[in-house]
Image: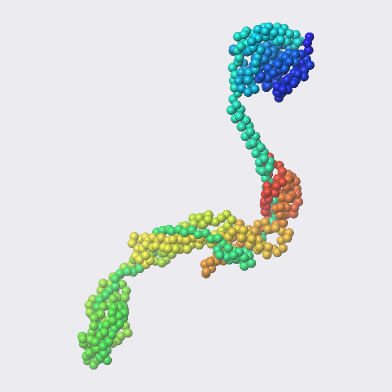
């Protein structure tokens, strides 16, 4: 009984390693047991190399496998196979219909590179001599090493080769690219998760007390910040709108025609000289005034009788003159008949008598646009637009500006009134189109914050053991906004509530919490005077310690008032 050697082939072994193991074996019979994935043994070239190595070393090979494709390839290399170490080996020849495993490639049938078909003994002219030697060289080998001849297949069976299926290398490259991409994404995620994403927010509850600040300040767009003089610069936003509003006028006015006619003036002067009466001189009858329309000269008087009475009956017609008069006011009550006597204001030497009817006076009361109507229309327009315009103006300020709501102001620009001021209204309605300019002022938060901190320090004095946690700038209140005479600045009453507590600096907190877990942080921070509570928020969820990088640590203070 011949001894044999069993060689187990590892999936990572290459053909060189297997050949080395065959050469190193001291036995004449060698059983090769391949892994489940046959690896290098699926190449016909590698199997022929193994067969040649065994032949040169005067050794016999047997491959232990259930793989039909490997058995067929082994048969082409004249290597017998057995299904188990206990079964008899046999030489398998490929048949026309043997295609059990399309994934196995016979390298001898691929006419390129290292897989170019190698010469085989049955391809030479010595087919008959080889046929005679084959039973003696390739025989069934049982587990005890005894050799028995085996019946070979026909020439027809041995000449047939299985079809070759070429692997899809494009699919392989695609899978490899996907694998590489997934690896890169995984590495990037790990870098982000470990070094970039971790962040900590530490909320420290500190006990504080209120400090009230109330002081008048002067504000203006052109002013410079001066804490000592209490002057702060402002930012002004404006909005211009042209609106039309309809209103009902309430003004009343009497309109009509003035009575007019002709009077005759008589010169009653005893001096015997001509006399003149100036235009605009009033003459009156029944307590109503009329106005002489032009200057007139009356010839010298020619009095009759003893000259003591000046009446028309005694006056020579040659010393009289006619002149037009118009009533001082409108109304029918100024209408008088011819012959009515008039007194001439300031002239006792002149007598006036209506030489014709003085008439045409009429009067009626109509509704007109009064100045009070215009003022009320403006106020209504400003009220209707105020909230909408205020919201528009607020939107124009940056987020870092504290708005002074009390500074909202309306300025009237051009206006058009239909009908005009003091004119009669027909239809009962009037309209006014006004260009309104709205404005609002604000103070940059950092400027107000600096001013209030200075005011708190002045009020409390030394703050070596205290810290201003909140100046009150964000919740500041303003009242009594009043624009100065020069329109360039205004005064306003400022009120704010600051928060002062124990002196705890942000960097001090960071130095304590860096690289620590919640329990350690809570213990150390609560030991600081003035700290009532601590909250630590770590993110993402897989982070359990505060990062070592100060840039990834945020310190927030939650203020609690002392009881």
Residue 478 vertical position relative to residue 72 in the rendered view, above or below: below
Task: Find residue 331 and report its image quarter.
Answer: bottom left
Q: Which of 116 and 482 is in front in this view?
A: 116
Is residue 390 visible in this depiction of the protein? yes
> In which quadrant of the rendered image does the C terminus lie?
bottom right
Q: What residue is at 76 percent from the left and 18 percent from the top?
A: 23
Q: Which colour scheme is used?
A: rainbow
Residue 404 percent coordinates (x, y):
56, 60
Along the horizontal axis of the image, is 449 left or right of 271? right
Q: What residue is at 37 percent from the left and 65 percent from the top?
A: 420
Is residue 64 visible in this depiction of the protein? no
Q: Which of 463 and 383 is in front in this view?
A: 463
Residue 486 percent coordinates (x, y):
52, 69
Residue 221 vertical position relative to residue 122 in the rendered view, above or below: below
Residue 278 percent coordinates (x, y):
30, 82
Residue 293 vertical position relative to residue 216 in the rendered view, above or below: below
Q: Nearer the viewer, residue 59 or 274?
A: 59
Q: What residue is at 61 percent from the left and 29 percent from the top?
A: 173
Task: Find residue 280 and report its image quarter.
Answer: bottom left
Along the horizontal axis of the image, is 87 left or right of 268? right
Residue 417 percent coordinates (x, y):
38, 63
């Amino acid at each position: 009984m011949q001894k044999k050697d069993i060689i187990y082939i590892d999936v990572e072994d290459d053909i060189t390693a297997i050949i080395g193991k065959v050469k190193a074996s001291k036995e004449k019979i060698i059983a090769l047991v391949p892994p489940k994935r046959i690896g290098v043994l699926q190449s016909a070239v590698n199997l022929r190399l193994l067969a040649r190595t065994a032949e040169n070393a005067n050794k016999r090979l047997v491959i232990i496998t259930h793989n039909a494709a490997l058995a067929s390839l082994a048969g082409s290399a004249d290597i017998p196979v057995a299904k188990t170490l206990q079964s008899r080996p046999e030489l398998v020849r490929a048949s026309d219909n043997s295609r059990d495993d399309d994934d196995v490639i016979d390298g001898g049938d691929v006419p390129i590179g290292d897989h170019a078909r190698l010469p085989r003994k049955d391809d030479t002219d010595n087919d008959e001599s080889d046929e005679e030697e084959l039973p003696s060289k390739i025989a069934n080998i049982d587990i005890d090493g005894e050799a028995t001849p085996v019946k070979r297949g026909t020439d027809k069976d041995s000449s047939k080769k299985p079809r070759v299926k070429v692997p899809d290398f494009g699919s392989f490259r695609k899978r490899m690219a996907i694998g590489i991409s997934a690896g890169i994404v995984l590495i990037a995620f790990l870098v982000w998760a470990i070094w970039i994403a971790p962040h900590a927010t530490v909320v420290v509850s500190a006990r504080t007390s209120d400090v009230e600040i109330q002081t008048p300040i002067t504000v203006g767009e052109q002013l410079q910040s001066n804490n000592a003089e209490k002057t702060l610069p402002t930012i002004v936003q404006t909005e211009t709108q042209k609106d039309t509003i309809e209103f009902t006028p309430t003004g009343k006015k009497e309109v009509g025609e003035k009575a007019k006619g002709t009077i005759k003036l008589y010169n009653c002067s005893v001096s015997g000289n001509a006399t003149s009466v100036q235009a605009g001189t009033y003459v009156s009858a029944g307590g109503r005034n009329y106005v002489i329309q032009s200057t007139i000269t009356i010839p010298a008087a020619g009095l009759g009788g003893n000259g003591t009475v000046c009446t028309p009956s005694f006056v020579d017609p040659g010393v009289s003159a006619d002149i037009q008069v118009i009533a001082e006011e409108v109304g029918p009550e100024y209408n008088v008949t011819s012959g009515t006597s008039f007194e001439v204001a300031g002239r006792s030497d002149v007598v006036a008598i209506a030489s014709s009817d003085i008439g045409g006076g009429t009067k009626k009361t109509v509704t007109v646009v009064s100045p009070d109507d215009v003022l009320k229309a403006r106020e209504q327009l400003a009220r209707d637009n105020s909230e909408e315009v205020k919201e528009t103006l607020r939107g124009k300020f940056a987020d870092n500006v504290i708005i002074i709501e009390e500074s909202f102001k309306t300025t009237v620009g051009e206006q058009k009134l239909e009908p005009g001021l003091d004119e009669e209204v027909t239809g009962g309605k009037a309209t006014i189109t006004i260009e309104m300019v709205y404005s609002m002022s604000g103070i940059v938060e950092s400027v107000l914050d600096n001013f209030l901190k200075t005011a708190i320090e002045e009020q409390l004095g030394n703050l070596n053991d205290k810290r201003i946690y909140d100046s009150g700038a964000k919740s500041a209140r303003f009242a009594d906004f009043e624009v100065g005479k020069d329109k360039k600045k205004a005064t306003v009453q400022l009120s704010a509530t600051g928060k002062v507590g124990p002196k705890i600096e942000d960097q001090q907190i960071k130095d304590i919490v860096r690289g620590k877990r919640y329990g350690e942080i809570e213990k150390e921070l609560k030991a600081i005077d003035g700290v009532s509570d601590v909250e630590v928020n770590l993110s993402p969820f897989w982070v359990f310690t505060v990062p070592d990088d100060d840039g990834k640590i945020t310190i927030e203070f939650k203020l609690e008032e002392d009881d």
